[in-house]
Image (cartoon, grey):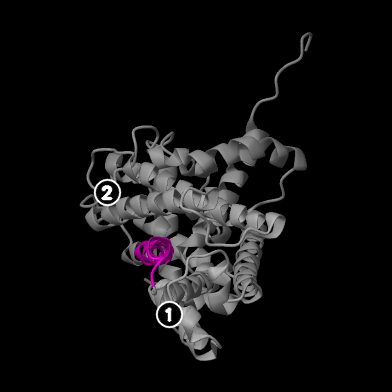
Amino acid sequence: MSPDDLTAEAERQLRICTACMYCDGLCPVFPAIDNQHRFELSDLAYLSNLCHNCRGCWSVCQYTPPHPFAINLPTTLAALRQRSYADYLWPAALGHAFRRPFLSIAVVVSTALLFTLAAVLLSTSPAELFGADDSAGAFYRVLPWPMMAGAAGASLLWAMLCIALATVRYWRATAPPLPTNAILQALRPAFRDIVTLRHLGGGGPGCTDIDERPSHQRRIAHHVMVAGCMGTVLSTVVAAIYHKGFGWLAPYPLLSLPVMLGGVGGLAMLVGIGGLLTIEQRADRQPSDPHEAQLNVAFLILLALVTLSGLAVLALRETAAMGLLLILHLGLVFGFFLALPFTKAIHAPFRAAALLRAAAEAAISRPTARKPGD
């Protein structure tokens, strides 16, 4: 479907939804379209990211196919979401990467292989690469800490810069002028919605991913994956404190805080990723956009590759495979950061911005309490 055809189809469906409003209360999309009869491109970009794809509207709508109205809002909003990723990404040229969902995997794997090859060829001590060594500082004898930290810092800074500028572009394009007071009032409810994924509940009972029976499986799997990711981030932070604050060099003992946080976090990530991939594989295809499903799967595969390589380093660090596994893992991490701006990860800040706008508009429309004597 061409961009113009997609816009026209989205407007057609949203006008019908505005007239019906049977789904009001299922998610924040429907209060946002109430009494609207015209939708600009910026409105469509906002509404599509406000949608959490819970499919609650699909399961209760009386106008879905084979009805002549042929309402399929989850699929339409999914296609609009992908257009918003490409339209507001920075640098703009990277937006074309969203047309090839599995390009990110090629970028990450290629980066890892090239980094590994370069590290092997440039190594001045092959014994450190292929020898079994788990003593303090063994990781930095394989790859010097300044090189390790420099490559990680540069690639992470690139990802953060691209995503931050894309989010700013998205906000400026989609959010109307809002009073500062309304934004401040919106911070708490928006943060609650972002952290709890409340709108993955389909209005309460859950998402209808696989059939018409609502379930919280996707919400739980998402929470487990994110919690595991936070564990690995904390592991890295604690390891940096150990290194720079106390002079304790990696690898650390199995029962040390960085290893336990990284190990438990990595396992939790794999559990969450496995759950989300299972849901994608079993999901009902009719209210799905195939391209978005590919974006989801590609991103989950990338997370799994990075996680598995990290756990492999932890499990085999006392063997001769440690050196190569460490370099390969670091290469995957660097490649992951380089590819991050044009993966499904961009949905997180865009959705957060949409939820903040929705909460701010709710704060503005909320009636002011009457004072005694008024």
Q: Give the residue pinned by disc 2.
A: 64
- Give how far across and how far down residue 134 sits, in percent: 48, 65
Can residue 8 be seen?
no
Local SS, label 1: helix
Q: Could you tell me which residue is drawn at 42 percent across and 54 percent down? A: 266
- Give how far across and how far down residue 294 sits, in percent: 34, 66
Give the side of residue 221 with respect to residue 265, left or right. left
Q: Which of marks 1 and 2 is nearer the N terminus?
A: 2
**Neighbourhood count class around disc 1 (C-alpha, 10 Å): few under 14, some 14–19, many 20 upward:** some
Query: Which residue in the rendered view is the most extreme toward the top?
Result: 373
**Neighbourhood count class around disc 2 (C-alpha, 10 Å): few under 14, some 14–19, many 20 upward:** some
C-alpha span from label 1 to label 2: 61 Å
Viewer-proximal residue among 353 and 370 = 353
Q: Could you tell me which residue is drawn at 43 percent across and 53 percent down? A: 263
Mark 2 is on which residue type? Thr
The quadrant where residue 147 appears? bottom right
The quadrant where residue 144 appears? bottom right
The magenta-colored residue range is 296-319
Q: Could you tell me which residue is drawn at 26 percent across and 54 percent down? A: 278
Can residue 176 be seen?
yes
- Give how far across and how far down residue 18 sits, in percent: 44, 43
Q: Can residue 297 be found in the magenta stretch?
A: yes
Quarter that holds the C terminus: top right
Mark 1 is on which residue type? Phe
Give the side of residue 313 with respect to residue 37, left or right. left
Q: Give the residue pinned by disc 1.
A: 130
Q: Is residue 342 above or below residue 124?
A: above
Viewer-proximal residue among 287 and 299 = 299
